Amino acid sequence: METTDAKKSFFETPMLSTKIKSANVKLVPEAAFGYLVGPAFALIANSVVNTYLSQYWRNVLGLGEWAYTFTWLLPLISAVIIVVGNLLVGRLFERKPTIAGKARPFILIGMPLMAIALLILFLVPFPKGATAQNPNWLTLVFIAVGYNLYYAVAYPFYYTSHSALVNLSTRDRSKRSLLATASNAAQIVASGAAGMVAPFFIDALGLLPAGEVTGQLADEAARSEANSKWVILMVILIVIQVIGCLLEYYFTRERITEEKFKLKIANSADNLALEAKKVPMSQQVKICARDKFWWMVIIFYFLYQLGGMLKNNDATWFSQAFLGANQTKLAGTINTVGAIPTALGMLVIWPLARKFGKANCIKVGGFLAFLMGCLGFLVLPLSDNTSAVWGISITAFCLKSIGTVPAMYISMALLSDVLEHQEAIYGIRTDGFSMAVYGSIMIAMPGVANAIINLINNNPNISSNVETWQIANTFIYFGGESICYLLIGLIFLFMNVERFSKLDKTAITNDQKEVAIRKGAEWVDPEIRLEQEQAEAEEQVHQEEIENLRKRVEKNNAKFHELTAAGKSTELKELVFEEELEKYETERANKKAEADRKKAEADKKREEQRLAKEKEHEQWLASLSDDQRNAYEKKMKEKEERKAAFDAESEREFLELRDLAAEERAANLA
C-alpha cells in the first residue's frame, strides 16, 4: 500500500485513512457500517426532501396558488442542469486516482455541500401576501438556487461516489453481492423512514397545515409556523446525514482501485506502485454507446427510478385524494406494511439469483410487479368505502412489492457485471461515465416525478373534483410503477451478460498479468495476493493488540505504584508484561484452534452432505428400470451438450468482441 510522497493526497493522511484493513470483505464492520448504516443515515434527508418537497411548496409556501407553473417547470428545467452537473462530477471522478480511492474522497467533499444546499432550500423567505398577480420573486429565487445547488451540485458529489463503491469494492462476486444487498437495503431503509415514519410525525407536528375546506390553504400564521418547523427538521436531518457520510467514508475500501498500486515495479528501491491510468471520458462514452448490455441496464435504472419516484412521491397525494386533505396516514401504513415482504425478500433473493441468474429474477419480478400493481385500480369503484380503500391499497402494494424485490437488491450487482464485462473486452473501466449517467438518472427522476405530480395535483381543475383527483393519483401511484416494471420485464428478455462472467474474470486476470510482466512488475495471482494481504492485516492487528496490552500493563503498574506509595490499599496487582503476553498468546491460539475446529467440522459436514446426496442419487438410479435409466442418462447427456454448446457460443462471441476491440486499439495507435 505504500506510495511515494508525490502521490500522497490530503485523503491519504492517517486521520482520513480507511478503517477497513481486511483484504476480504466482512459483514462487520465493512458491510454493516460502510454499506448499510452509514448510507442509510446519509440518504434519509434526501428521501424526506424527495417525498415532501412538493407538499412543502404547496401547503406551506402556497406555491400552487400563486406560482403553479413554477412548481412543475422548475423540476423539469432543472433535470437538464442535474444531468450536466452529474457529468461534470463524473469527469472529476476520473481524475488520476490515488490509493485513497477514486470515489471515497467525494463523500467528504459532498457532505458540507449537501448541508448548505438543504438549508438554502428550506431557509426561504416566507411569501407573505403573495398572489399570482404579485408573486414573491425572492422566495422563488431562493427555491430555484437551493434546488439546483442541492440536486445538480451537492448531491451528485455524494451519490455518484456512493453508487460506485460496490463496483470498486472487490472482484469477489459473492462478496460484491453482499455489499450490493447492504447498499440497496440502505436506500430502502432511508425511503422507509420517509414513507413509513415521516407521515405520522408530519401529521402530529403540523408540518403540512390544512385549511378548513378540502384543497384550501391554511392561514398564513399556521403556514409560517410550519415553515420554521421545517428548518428545525432539516437541521436534525443534516446532523444525521453527516454521521452517515463519516461512517460510509471510514468503513469502505476500494480494492479494485488499489489493484493498480499493488503491482510493484521490479528492481525499484522505493517499491513504487504502477501509476494508474486516467481514462478519457470520450473513450468511456464510445465504449458505453456500443454496449447493448450497458444500454439495457441504464434503461432499466431510468424505468426503475421513474416508477419508484412516482410511487414514493405520490403516496401522500394518493392518501389525501381518498381520505381527505392532509390525511397522510394511509401512505404511512401502506409503506410500513409493504416493507415486510421487501425485508423478507432480501433474505431469499440472493439464493434465487445464484440459482436462476440476476437478470432472470429481475425479469420475472418485473412481470409480477405489473400484474399485482394492476390490482390497485380496484380502489376506484370502491372509493366510497374507506375500509375497502385501505385493504385494497395495502394488499396490492404488498403483492407488487414482492415483484420489485429483485430490482431493489440485485440490480447494482448486475451493473457491476456489465462494467466488468466492458473491462474484459476493452481493457478499461467506464465507472466515471457510467456512474455519472446512473447518478443523473437517480437524482433527476425525483424532480421529473414531482413535476408530473405537481402538474396534476396543483391543477385546480383536477384537485377540485374528488373523483377526477382519485383517478389521476391512482394512475400515478399504482399505474406509473406497474407500467415501468412491465417494460423492464420485456427488456430483460434480452439481458444475458452473466453468461460471460467466468470469461470476464479470466480475461481481466490475464490482462493484468500481461501488463505487469511487460512493465517489469512482480506478478502475484489476485487470490494469492488477497490471502497475503489478509495475513498482513491480521498480523498488523496482532501487533497492535500486543502494543495495547503493553500500554495497559504500564498504566496498571503506574497506578499500582502510585497507590502503594501513598499508603492506600488497592485491589490492583503489579503485572509482568511477559506473563500477560503469554496469557494473551495462549488465549489467541486457543481461539484460533477453536475457529479451525469449527471450520473443519463445517467442511466435514458439507462433505458428508455431498456424499449423502451422491449416494441417494445412486440409489435412485439403481431403483430405475433399464429403460428409465437409459432415458434419464440420455436426457442428462443432452443437457450437458446444450450447456457445452452454450458455453462454446458464449466464448466465441466473447473472443470476437475482444478481437474487434484489439483491432480498434491498433487502428487508433496507427
Image (cartoon, rainbow, N blue to C red):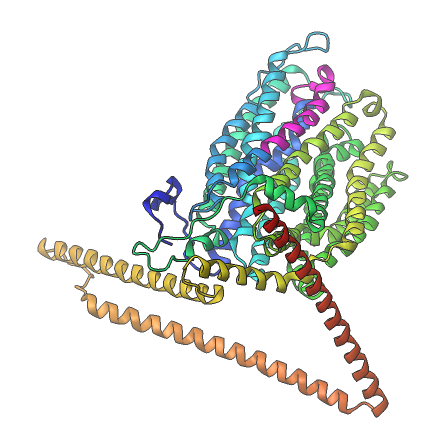
Figure quadrant of residue 327: top right
Question: How far across and down, in percent of the image, does residue 120 sit?
Answer: 54, 23
Q: Looking at the image, which is closer to me, 418 or 551?
A: 418
* Relative height, residue 417 to residue 118 (above, below): below
* Relative height, residue 636 to residue 518 (above, below): below
The outermost residue toward the top is 134
* Relative height, residue 628 to residue 591 (above, below): below
The answer, for residue 224, to whether it is visible in the render is: yes
The outermost residue toward the right is 381
Answer left or right for 20 relative to 137. left
Residue at left 70%, top 35%?
313
Question: How far across and down, in percent of the image, does residue 84 sit?
Answer: 61, 31
Residue at left 87%, top 30%?
467
Q: In this picture, which residue range is highlighted in magenta?
A: 59-86
Residue at left 38%, top 54%?
1
Q: Is the magenta region chiefly helix, strand or loop?
A: helix
Task: Look at the image and say whether residue 63 sits in the magenta stretch.
Answer: yes
Residue at left 74%, top 76%?
640
Q: Looking at the image, which is closer to me, 569 or 205?
A: 205
The answer, for residue 203, to whether it is visible in the render is: no
Label count reads 0
Q: Looking at the image, which is closer to me, 448 or 464?
A: 448
Task: Look at the image and say whether residue 118 sits in the magenta stretch.
Answer: no
Answer left or right for 102 relative to 454. left
Figure quadrant of residue 135: top right
Question: How far across and down, in percent of the image, does residue 312 sit?
Answer: 70, 39
Answer left or right for 448 relative to 469. left
Figure quadrant of residue 573: bottom left
Question: How far across and down, in percent of the image, does residue 627 sit?
Answer: 86, 89
